[in-house]
Amino acid sequence: MAQGQSRSSNVLVVPQANAALDQLKYEVAQELGIAIPQDGYYGNMATRDTGAIGGNITRRLVQIAEQQLAGQQNFQ
Protein backbone atom coordinates (compact mmCIF):
# COMPACT_ATOMS: atom_id res chain seq x y z
CA MET A 1 0.00 0.00 0.00
CA ALA A 2 1.36 3.41 -0.94
CA GLN A 3 2.36 5.82 1.75
CA GLY A 4 -0.50 7.99 3.00
CA GLN A 5 -3.20 5.69 1.65
CA SER A 6 -5.74 4.06 3.87
CA ARG A 7 -7.43 0.68 3.66
CA SER A 8 -10.54 2.23 5.10
CA SER A 9 -13.69 1.85 3.04
CA ASN A 10 -15.34 4.75 4.84
CA VAL A 11 -16.68 7.33 2.44
CA LEU A 12 -17.67 10.73 3.74
CA VAL A 13 -21.30 11.66 3.15
CA VAL A 14 -20.17 15.29 2.88
CA PRO A 15 -16.72 15.25 1.21
CA GLN A 16 -16.21 18.93 2.07
CA ALA A 17 -16.07 17.90 5.75
CA ASN A 18 -12.70 16.19 5.21
CA ALA A 19 -10.64 19.26 6.13
CA ALA A 20 -12.70 19.89 9.27
CA LEU A 21 -12.34 16.26 10.37
CA ASP A 22 -8.58 16.38 9.81
CA GLN A 23 -8.39 19.56 11.89
CA LEU A 24 -10.42 17.89 14.64
CA LYS A 25 -8.05 14.91 14.58
CA TYR A 26 -5.01 17.15 15.10
CA GLU A 27 -6.73 19.15 17.85
CA VAL A 28 -7.72 16.03 19.77
CA ALA A 29 -4.26 14.50 19.38
CA GLN A 30 -2.64 17.70 20.64
CA GLU A 31 -4.95 17.81 23.67
CA LEU A 32 -4.04 14.21 24.47
CA GLY A 33 -0.32 14.89 23.98
CA ILE A 34 -0.07 12.45 21.07
CA ALA A 35 2.05 13.34 18.04
CA ILE A 36 0.49 12.42 14.69
CA PRO A 37 3.10 11.31 12.14
CA GLN A 38 3.71 13.98 9.51
CA ASP A 39 4.10 11.37 6.77
CA GLY A 40 0.58 10.04 7.39
CA TYR A 41 1.77 6.52 8.27
CA TYR A 42 0.15 5.36 11.50
CA GLY A 43 1.77 1.92 11.56
CA ASN A 44 4.30 2.92 14.19
CA MET A 45 1.73 4.39 16.56
CA ALA A 46 0.40 2.43 19.51
CA THR A 47 -3.12 1.12 19.10
CA ARG A 48 -3.99 2.68 22.44
CA ASP A 49 -3.04 6.13 21.11
CA THR A 50 -4.95 5.85 17.83
CA GLY A 51 -7.95 4.47 19.73
CA ALA A 52 -7.85 7.37 22.17
CA ILE A 53 -7.83 9.85 19.29
CA GLY A 54 -10.71 8.10 17.52
CA GLY A 55 -12.73 7.75 20.70
CA ASN A 56 -12.38 11.41 21.56
CA ILE A 57 -13.27 12.44 18.00
CA THR A 58 -16.42 10.32 18.22
CA ARG A 59 -17.29 11.82 21.61
CA ARG A 60 -16.94 15.35 20.19
CA LEU A 61 -18.99 14.58 17.07
CA VAL A 62 -21.80 13.13 19.19
CA GLN A 63 -21.69 16.20 21.42
CA ILE A 64 -21.91 18.50 18.38
CA ALA A 65 -24.83 16.50 16.96
CA GLU A 66 -26.66 16.58 20.31
CA GLN A 67 -26.24 20.36 20.50
CA GLN A 68 -27.57 20.76 16.96
CA LEU A 69 -30.54 18.51 17.67
CA ALA A 70 -31.29 20.39 20.87
CA GLY A 71 -31.22 23.63 18.91
CA GLN A 72 -33.66 22.23 16.34
CA GLN A 73 -36.01 21.10 19.12
CA ASN A 74 -36.25 24.67 20.40
CA PHE A 75 -37.53 25.95 17.03
CA GLN A 76 -40.20 23.28 16.43
Image (cartoon, rainbow, N blue to C red):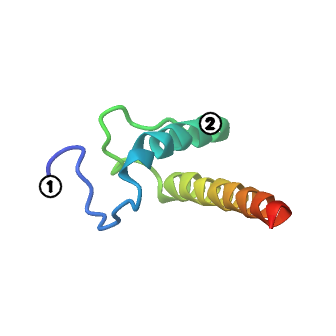
Is residue 42 positioned above or below 9 on the image? above
Please, what is the three-letter code of the amino acid marked with disc 2? Gly
Whole-percent x, y for residue 24 in the image = 55, 42
Mark number, residue 1: 1
Precedes in sequence: disc 1 or disc 2: 1
List the residue tagged with mark 2: 33
From the image, which quarter does the N terminus lie in? bottom left
Determine the residue located farthest toward the right in the rendered image: 74
Residue density around tag 2, few if under 14, some if 14–19, many if 20 or more, within 10 Å: few
Please count the marks in the image.
2
Residue at 47% from the left image edge and 53% from the top image edge: 46
Element at badge 2? loop
Q: Does residue 67 appear to the left or right of 18 in the view shown?
A: right
Please, what is the three-letter code of the amino acid marked with disc 1? Met
Q: Does residue 13 appear to the left or right of 2 in the view shown?
A: right
Which residue occupies the foreground of this view, 8 or 3? 8
Labels 1 and 2 touching (C-beta < 8 A): no
Determine the residue located farthest toward the top in the rendered image: 38
Which residue occupies the foreground of this view, 39 or 67? 67
Q: Quadrant of residue 70?
A: bottom right
From the image, which quarter does the C terminus lie in? bottom right
Whole-percent x, y for residue 32 in the image = 65, 41
Whole-percent x, y for residue 50 in the image = 50, 54
Residue at 45% from the left image edge and 38% from the top image edge: 36
Element at badge 1? loop
Whole-percent x, y for residue 27 in the image = 59, 36
